[in-house]
Amino acid sequence: MSDAMISATHITVVRSGRKLLDNVGIDLEPGKFTVVIGPNGAGKSTLMKVLSGEMTADMGHVSYYGTSVDLCQPVDLAKRRAVLPQATQLAFPFTALEIARMGAVAHGALNPTEEGRKALSRVGLRGFESRPYPSLSGGEQQRVQFARALAQVPQPVADGLPRALFLDEPTASLDLGHQISVLEIARDFASAGGIVLAILHDLNLAAEFADHLVVLNHGRVVAEGPCADTVNDDIISAVYGIAGTVGRLPAAHIPYVLPQSRHR
Amino acid sequence: MPFRASDDGDRTRQGVATLVLLALLLLIACLISLGVGPTGVGLKDLWAYATGHSASLTTQERVILEAVRLPRTALGLLVGAGLAVSGAMMQGLFRNPLADPGIVGVTSGASLAAVTAIVLGGTVLSPMALFFGNYFLPLMAFFGGLLNTWLLYIIAMRAGRTSTTALILSGIAIGALTAAMTGLLIFMADDRQLRDITFWSLGSLGGATFGRVSSILPFVLVVLAIMPFVARGLDALILGDAAAFHMGIPVQRLKKIVIVAVAAACGASVAVAGSIGFVGIVVPHLLRLTMGPSHRFLLPGSALGGGALLLIADSVARTVAAPAELPIGVITALFGAPIFLFLLLGRNGIGMRDVQ
């Protein structure tokens, strides 16, 4: 086990007598885009909560570069990883810039307002700085939150250690173009030596972007590895109950859009 | 939206400008409070007194300035600042612009404890009363407020957030229960205690002395001192417990500190001035409209604005029906209740967003 990674071993989480996670192990390596897929209730979000330090596992161990997550203060964790949650609603009308700025403040930026501005323009929201968050569309809100996460870990590698981006369904409320641009930003983060973990529902996007794919079902890892080994008819039909779908074209009368076809 | 953000989305300048204006407003409010009253001692006398020409004043005029107006102004400043800051902090903690210490029953908890102190202070609790002296009443009110804030937090918080309905209904329930217990105590009280309770519960800055000022000063100072340390955490908390933790905020510790601070500011204010409603909801609400919801500016702004508002309200209370005095709670409720209703009906869209 390298010290330069985030790793979880033998993670078991039990809630109301149900095993949400059952002896799960996962290594998040620098330079790799790791994607977790699986049906609803498979334990994907729970795994991310355990990895981010937000939830303590009943059994097992999470470590950041060799240090147990239990020994890390929230403020130290905040410098090492940023988390993009699923939809967030606010009772108070912060502007888009004020939200993004909070991420920059969290990592101790000297000029958080400027860094927040930079993060907003990275996600294509230049000109949205003064818009009140509650007045934005769901997709725009999601991108503001993504900007906040980026502002929290502006460098994929800092002080010789990789930083991590945890993305819980980052594409959920985005249109096709923004789904791809958000994941491209995340991939660039990984290529530059950072750690990326994303939960995705779209198997096409998962197959296109993941360097390492983890398939969860009923709280267990049922397959992991490169996409070529994990996205196949057997696994997809065992996990999702949909057979005969991998690498085949639909009947001629159904139009289809495969965004990955843009790589020819 | 009724509030304007500057074009680049950075409201820092607006925040600073508003704070400067509020400081000026507070200064003017202090001058009005010191220089206006039914006795005819006016700003000219205040000026003579302040510039060291106090020899030109009669003894009576000097006494009015030194022993009546000065402590009353200081008390109003502290109570107003304490109430407004505790309102702003509570709204941040509950992620709800309607969380006012008066409306959700924190004040009634402090009242219950204060009445307990008055009724039982001579008998069962007399050792404590003797030991804490001047601080006995504010300390009791602090613990009463703390108990109710904590209860409310447990009852109204569901999955990390409060619905307005749960907040207000549990506030009413807790308030009713503590009011009933207060009633029981009043029933047990003797004539002298009844008079004390009645005077105290009228909700007034009248009868202010430097003794009272010094008894709540430490409580309010502590709350003002922690403002810079909780501002960032409260901002992050608006995004939810999990997001705040992700941004490095020790969420549980922050919440405990804020609950204790709210109880301290609120309890101390109730102990010296009775229950004065709506300051904690009106001031932060008006400030959010002008400077945005960030607690960096909202908390200090609430301290300045709360002090100014209460001093102006008190000046009005002293003069409109002179020589009689209107209870100050009547004045604050007269303009506070409509603003509360306005928020509740969600005309501007931020009141009911989290109802469900």
Image (cartoon, helix red, strand yellow):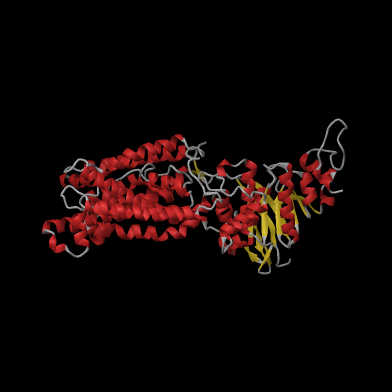
Residue situated in front as seen by the camera: A264 or A4: A264
Q: How many marks?
A: 0
Residue A3 position (above or below residue B263): below
Location of residue A105 in the rendering, given as x and y in whole percent from the top left corner: 56, 59
Location of residue B101 in the rendering, given as x and y in whole percent from the top left corner: 38, 46
Residue B140 makes an appearance in the image: no
Location of residue B241 in the rendering, given as x and y in whole percent from the top left corner: 54, 51
Is residue B141 shown left or right of residue A185?
A: left
Residue located at (70% from left, 54% from top): A197
Res B125 quadrant in image: bottom left
Q: Residue furthest bottom?
A: A160
Q: Residue furthest front?
A: B44
Location of residue A38 in the rendering, given as x and y in whole percent from the top left corner: 73, 45
Residue B355 makes an appearance in the image: yes
Residue situated in front as seen by the camera: B353 or B3: B3
Q: Residue furthest top?
A: A253
Is residue B112 shown left or right of residue A100?
A: left
Residue located at (86% from left, 30% from top): A253
Residue situated in front as seen by the camera: B147 or B244: B244
Residue A106 position (above or below residue B7): below
